[in-house]
Amino acid sequence: MKILIVDDDATNRLVLGAYLKQDGFEIISANDGQAAIDLFQDEQPDLILMDIMMPVLDGYEATKKIKVLSGERFIPIIFLTSMTDEKALSQCVEVGGDDFLTKPYNRTILTAKINALERVSDLYNTNQRQKQEQELITRRELEAQEQEVARKVFDSILSPGSLSSDNIQLHLSPMSLFNGDVVLAACLVEIDTSNNVLKYWNGAIPAAYLMQGDALIELKSTNLPLGILGDAGFSNKLDLIEIRDKDKIVLSTDGILEAENSNGGMFGSERFLKCLNSELTLDVTRSALFDHILQSMNEFVDGYEQTDDVTLAVINCDIDYINQLATERGQSKKFIPSHWSFELCFYYDALKSIDPIPLINQTLVEIQGYQIQQDKLSTILTELFCNSLDHGLLGLDSKMKSTPEGFMQFYSDKELLLKSMDEGFIKIAVKNIPTKNGGDLTIVFEDSGKGFDTSKLEKPKMPVSAEDNAMNFSGRGLLLIKSYCQSISYNEKGNRVECVYSWSNSD
Amino acid sequence: MPITSSSNGNTVDIVISGRFDFSVHKEFRDSYSDTQSGSATEFIIDMSQTEYVDSSALGMLLLLREHAGSDKANVTIKDCQSDVKDIMIVSNFDKLFTIS
């Protein structure tokens, strides 16, 4: 154990040093506070005996600084003082002293104090080390988890299938397999053939170009790599460029630009651009460009070991081919008209905030794709829903709507009644029976309202003349339902309506 | 704003975008209520941006027609998308309005 003695009195240093050497401690000494700080940094003592009154820097100040310099380590400091007033002693503790000893020294007490503090110090430092080790383990576990997640993302992005199209040429080197980076430089491109636009988002891919005729357009990176910014900082803003048939998109990772040869030289963007430029002027096929770049790089590297991933993609914007591909993909998932049914029930509080129609539409898309004509069905569902809510639950009378003022009144009443509604429900059941080219969809709306006298239900009639219609502001909803559905029927009470809508494959 | 209107002499242009249903009935009424009622005013309703209409929208159009002089009204509904036009035709609105 190494002990630093700090005292401006040479005699004191000698006496104290002699005692402690006898006890087997290693002794270093300083004659003022500043010297103590310097020595502390050079010699890393395990314990310090500190006088208070000293020239240059006194014991209080030296202690404060040394405690800061110790950081996480515990280096005990014992004040040596001839002062006995309580204020001076408490100041010793305030500045960070761990104990004090009054002169003249009692050797037994001194040794006992040093030993006690040594034990505390050992305990503290062991504890501290274990804490650091634990933190290291936790950090490693976290990193392992992050890498696992990143690897999954990486694998999913590179899943084959989407890359096998004839207009895409791709080189993925062995290092392109996940190399442990948890941030991902990425460039996403979308070729929109209906508007002849290239949409792209570039996050730190250094070499991304559009080759258009004899022009070389850089798809500049304006974003950070993925995995750095949180959701709030992330920008999904796309950059747009007009494209023409047979344009080429070249994407490359920094591994190509930074490919090294045995002399430590890098392939560099100049050589890369030279490859692109030489192909611009020539009327060459797309495969020539792809091979040209890889060949140039391989010649440059000349067999030197590869250190980063080398990924190169050349995409040919062959509009006809892409359109054909899109059509094939669209047909890949075939929805077959099938047997199914579902039922939803919305209570009064839900009805205040939820519009069930988009939910039902979405469900139908999940089940049958876009085979069911959504626009007509939306109309049917909306009108049925409005009838159940307005007349069934809220008890509004559609006759109100027969005057312009009443029409407006109807809707403001509806808003008020909806707000104060505190009971009731609407149950919606949808069932499909497949037919040869589609299906018969049975739609049932049932509400908890009083119903109505169905015998008084006027046979909905088409307005045959302008006069007929002009004075009649209501009943059009039912008319729409009637014209789109195969059948519509009410139960006797008038709180349940059942419609059958036949649909056929849109294509 | 889903509904905007502008008047130019005796012509009032109303543009309806998005969903045309009861939630916009106040806005729709405000778009023409300041105009002089009767057939002196011509109304042109641009529905090229209208994605959806329901039965209450049809009622609102009829109210506008009444404001504009009923059978003498001069109301044109133009550029409907096909789904919307379908509903207009099913409801026989082509007999009440000029649909172009």
Image (cartoon, helix red, strand yellow):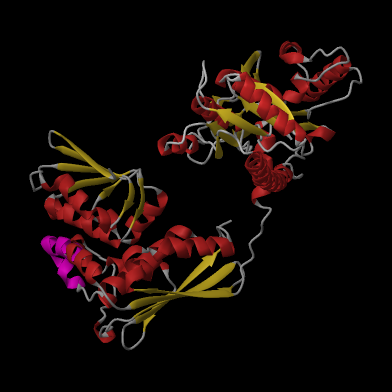
Q: How many marks?
A: 0
Q: Is residue A403 magenta?
A: yes
In the rendered structure, which segment of residues is drawn in magenta? A398-411
Indicate the position of residue A191 as horizontal and vertical percent values: 61, 33
Left or right for A115, reference A423: right
Q: Is residue A67 left or right of residue A24?
A: left
**Residue A349 to residue B83: above or below:** below
Q: Nearer the viewer, residue A445 or A38?
A: A38
In the image, A466 versus A312, the foreground residue is A312
Q: Position of residue A224 (x, y in %)?
A: 58, 29
Residue name at image x 88 percent, y 24 percent: A305
A456 vs A36, nearest the viewer: A36
Q: Is residue A422 magenta?
A: no
Residue B53: percent from the left, percent from the top?
Answer: 33, 55
Q: Spot the residue most to the right.
A: A303
The reply to whether residue A431 is in sight is no
Q: Residue A396 lies in what quarter of the image? A: bottom left
Q: Quadrant of residue B23?
A: bottom left
Of the 4 image quadrants, the one containing the N terminus of chain B is: top left
Could you tell me if residue A169 is visible in this image? yes
Location of residue A261 in the rendering, given as x and y in whole percent from the top left corner: 86, 16
Q: Where is the C terminus of chain B found, in terms of image quarters?
A: top left
Q: Nearer the viewer, residue B63 or A287?
A: A287
Q: Can you tell which quarter of the image residue A104 is in?
A: top right
Magenta stretch, overall SS: helix
Task: Name the side, left or right, on which A141 lies relative to A371.
Answer: right
Residue at point 44% right, 64% down? A377
Q: Check the image and report above or below for B50 versus A212.
A: below
